[in-house]
C-alpha cells in the first residue's frame, strides 16, 4: 500500500540504544532531515476551512469584524452608575428632571438588590459552598478513577506489546539460528561438491590415460607387406589369442581404479540430490 509505514523496531528485545554515539547519530539524522525539508507557506491549502459559524454568536461576529477592521475596543460604559443632574440648559424642563429621577430610582434598586444578595449569601452561602465542594470532590474522585483506568489500559498495552515482541524475538532468533545452520550446511555441501568434482575430473583423466585405444572403423586392413608374409586369417587368429592373453593378464590395479571412479560418480550423484533437497527446504 502506498504511503504505508512498516515499523520494524522491537525496543523490548533490541539492544544498543544506550551505546556511545547512538543518540548523537540519531540527532544528526534528524538535523539532516530538517535541513532537507523545505516547508511551504500554504501547506494546509488542501484541507477545508473549519466550520465555526454554528458556534458564533452575534456578539462574537461583531467582535471579529472589529478585530478584522482594526478598530479600537469600546470602553466600559459607567453611565448607569452615575447620578448626573439635568444639564444646565434643561433645568426648567420637566422631562429632564423626570429622566434624572428614573435614573436615581434604577440606581437605588440596583443597590437594594446587591444588599439582598449579600444577605442571602450570609444565610445560605456556607451551605452552598459546602454543596459545591461535595460536587467538586465527587468530580475529582471520578476523574481519579478514570485516570487510574487509563493508566491500567496503558500498562496492559505495554505489557501486551512487550509479550508480543518477546515472542517475536524468540521466533526471530530461532529462525536466524536455523538459517545459519542451513547456510553452513549448504557451504559444506558446496565445498564437498567442489572436492568431489576435482576427484571425478582427476579420476576421469586417469581412466582415459589407462584405458586401451579402441580401433575405429576407418582403419584399413593390413597389407601383405605389413604381415611379414603371414596369411590374413592366421594374423587374425594370432591377434585374437594375444588379446585374450592380455585380458587374462590385465593389471588388477586398473580394475580397482575403474571401480573407484564408478563409486566417486555415484557419490557425486548422491551429493547433488542432497544439495537439491537442501535448497528446496531453504
Image (cartoon, grey):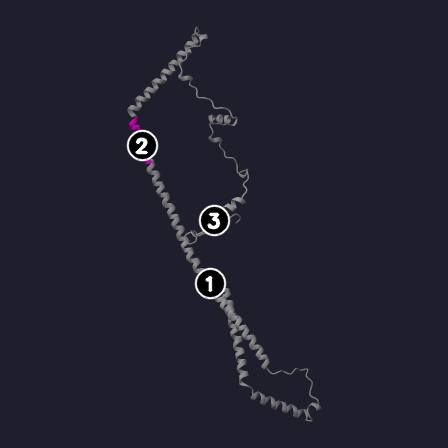
For image coordinates 38% across by 13% down, the residue present is 104
Judged by depth in the image, the label closer to the viewer, 1 or 2, is: 1
70 lies above or below 46: above
Residue picked out by circle 1: 180
- The residue that disc 3 covers is 26
Which residue is at the front of the view, 163 or 13? 13
Residue 281, horizontal then vertical, whole percent: 49, 64
Q: Position of residue 21 (x, y in %)?
A: 46, 51
99 or 173, which is in the foreground? 173
Q: Secondary structure at mark 3?
A: helix
- The question of residue 131 being in magenta is answered with yes
**Could you give the CA–CA distance between mark 2 and mark 3, rounded to whole angstroms?**
50 Å
Under circle 1, the secondary element is helix
| Residue interval drawn in magenta | 125-138
Q: Locate residue 32 relative to residue 78 in the image: left or right.
A: right
> Separation of disc 1 and disc 2 at Cα?
69 Å
Label 3 crowd bin: few (<14), some (14–19), many (20+), radius 10 Å: few
- Residue most extreme to the top: 92
Q: Is residue 274 left or right of residue 124?
A: right
Q: Quadrant of residue 78?
A: top left
Q: As drawn, is 24 to the left or to the right of 200?
A: left
In the picture, the disc for residue 133 is: 2
Precedes in sequence: disc 1 or disc 3: 3
Is residue 92 depicted above or below 24 in this figure? Answer: above
| Residue 197 position in % (x across, y down) | 54, 72
Residue at the extreme front of the image, as rendered: 20
Identify the secondary structure beneath mark 2.
helix
Q: Examine the rendered structure and indicate whether residue 100 appears above or below residue 57.
A: above
Q: Is residue 42 magenta?
A: no
* Precedes in sequence: disc 1 or disc 2: 2
Amino acid at each position: 500500500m502506498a504511503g504505508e509505514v512498516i515499523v520494524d523496531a522491537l525496543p523490548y528485545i533490541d539492544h544498543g540504544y544506550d551505546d556511545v554515539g547512538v543518540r548523537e547519530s540519531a540527532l544528526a539524522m534528524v538535523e539532516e532531515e530538517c535541513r532537507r525539508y523545505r516547508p511551504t507557506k500554504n501547506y494546509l491549502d488542501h484541507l477545508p476551512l473549519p466550520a465555526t459559524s454554528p458556534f458564533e454568536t452575534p456578539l462574537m461576529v461583531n467582535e471579529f469584524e472589529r478585530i478584522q477592521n482594526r478598530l479600537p475596543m469600546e470602553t466600559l460604559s459607567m453611565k448607569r452608575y452615575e447620578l448626573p443632574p439635568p444639564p444646565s440648559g434643561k433645568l426648567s424642563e420637566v422631562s429632564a428632571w423626570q429622566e434624572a429621577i428614573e435614573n436615581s430610582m434604577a440606581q437605588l434598586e440596583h443597590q437594594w438588590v446587591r444588599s439582598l444578595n449579600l444577605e442571602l449569601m450570609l444565610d445560605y452561602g456556607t451551605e452552598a459552598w459546602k454543596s459545591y465542594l461535595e460536587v467538586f470532590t465527587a468530580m475529582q474522585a471520578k476523574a481519579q478513577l478514570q485516570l487510574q483506568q487509563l493508566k491500567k489500559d496503558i500498562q496492559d498495552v505495554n505489557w501486551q506489546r512487550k509479550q508480543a515482541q518477546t515472542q517475536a524475538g524468540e521466533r526471530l532468533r530461532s529462525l536466524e539460528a536455523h538459517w545459519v545452520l542451513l547456510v553452513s550446511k549448504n557451504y559444506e555441501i558446496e565445498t564437498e561438491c567442489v572436492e568431489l568434482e576435482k576427484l571425478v575430473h582427476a579420476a576421469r583423466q586417469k581412466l582415459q590415460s589407462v584405458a586401451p585405444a579402441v580401433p575405429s572403423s576407418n582403419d584399413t586392413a593390413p597389407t601383405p607387406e605389413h604381415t611379414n608374409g603371414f596369411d590374413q586369417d592366421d594374423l587374425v587368429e594370432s591377434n585374437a589369442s594375444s588379446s585374450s592373453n592380455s585380458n587374462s593378464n590385465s593389471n588388477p590395479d586398473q580394475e580397482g581404479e575403474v571401480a573407484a571412479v564408478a563409486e566417486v560418480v555415484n557419490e557425486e550423484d548422491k551429493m547433488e540430490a542432497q544439495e537439491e533437497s537442501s535448497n528446496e527446504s531453504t
